[in-house]
Image (tube, rainbow, N blue to C red):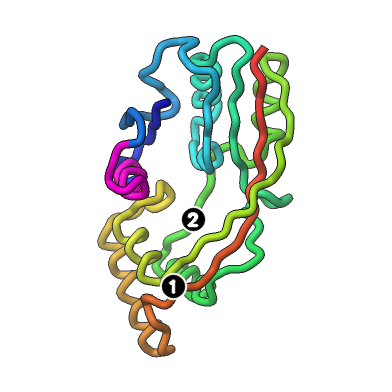
Amino acid sequence: MAGLDISEAMLRRLVSNADGVRPFSLLLADASGLPLAAGSFGSVLAVHVLHLIPAWQEAVDEAVRVLRPGGALVASFPSGEAGTQQQHLMAPWRPAVREVLARHGIARARSGARTARDVEAYLGDRATARMLPPVRVLETQTLAGTLRDLEEQLYSWTWPYPREQLLAAGADIRAWAQGQDVRLDEEHPVEGTLEWWAFDVA
């Protein structure tokens, strides 16, 4: 197994989630230019990523290149017709955070493959698409954690913005929380659903 991400912060998060130990080889690289030999893997797992990559076709081509014959690209996609993850239960402060970010000119843009059908159409007869059972995602979030991830620019959609812009928005979110008596460390359950698809390479 090997793990790859363009974000060093994301690779650090993976190690942190694995109790500080690298669970397998990790590579800091771009999915649209994999530093891996052709035909070297039986499967490629793309988790919550193809909808974020502008050059997603190149990333899909690279995934197919490193797969052995009979291998599969397994990818998750935000569910729902609008291409947004279905949130059955979300943190109560989320709308306020979005509003403050919007006032600061910060928006979460997606520029990659919006649905599995995009990837299926692009691959054509190179692969056969099949839908896998959707996965229920349940986690606990805090406003403090959300602010940390925003200000440290953990997610790729924050990269186009100067850090000072994100820090200013973070300060306003903290001011809002203080005015509304919202505790930054209060834990809230968050539940959503992700679609999973396999693209079996001929």
Look at the image and give the residue range highlighted in magenta: 11-22
Q: Mark 1 or 2 closer to N-term?
A: 1
Q: Amino acid at mark 1?
A: Val
Label 2 crowd (10 A; few <14 / some 14-19 / many >=20): few
Q: CA distance from mark 1 to mark 2?
A: 13 Å
Residue bearing the label numbered 1:
100
- Element on which disc 2 rests: loop
Q: Position of residue 31 (x, y in %)?
A: 43, 28
Q: Position of residue 98 (x, y in %)?
A: 49, 68
Residue bearing the label numbered 2:
108
Residue drawn at (49%, 36%), measured in percent from left and top?
54
- Horizontal side, residue 181 vs residue 16: left or right: right
Residue drawn at (66%, 25%), measured in percent from left and top?
199
Residue 190: which numbered mark, if any?
none
Number of callouts? 2
Quarter of the rendering occupied by the N terminus: top left
In the image, residue 4 above or below residue 171? above
Q: Position of residue 55 (x, y in %)?
A: 49, 30
Q: Amino acid at mark 2?
A: Arg
Q: Position of residue 180 (x, y in %)?
A: 43, 89
Residue 60 quadrant: top right
- Element on which disc 1 rests: helix
In the image, residue 182 above or below residue 144? below
- Answer yes or no: do the residues labelled 1 and 2 have beta carbons within 8 Å? no
In the image, residue 117 above or below residue 100? above
- Horizontal side, residue 51 vs residue 173: left or right: right
Residue 74 quadrant: top right
Label 1 crowd (10 A; few <14 / some 14-19 / many >=20): some
Q: Nearer the viewer, residue 23 or 5?
A: 23
Residue drawn at (64%, 48%), measured in percent from left and top?
135
Residue 175 quadrant: bottom left
In the image, residue 61 above or below residue 117? above
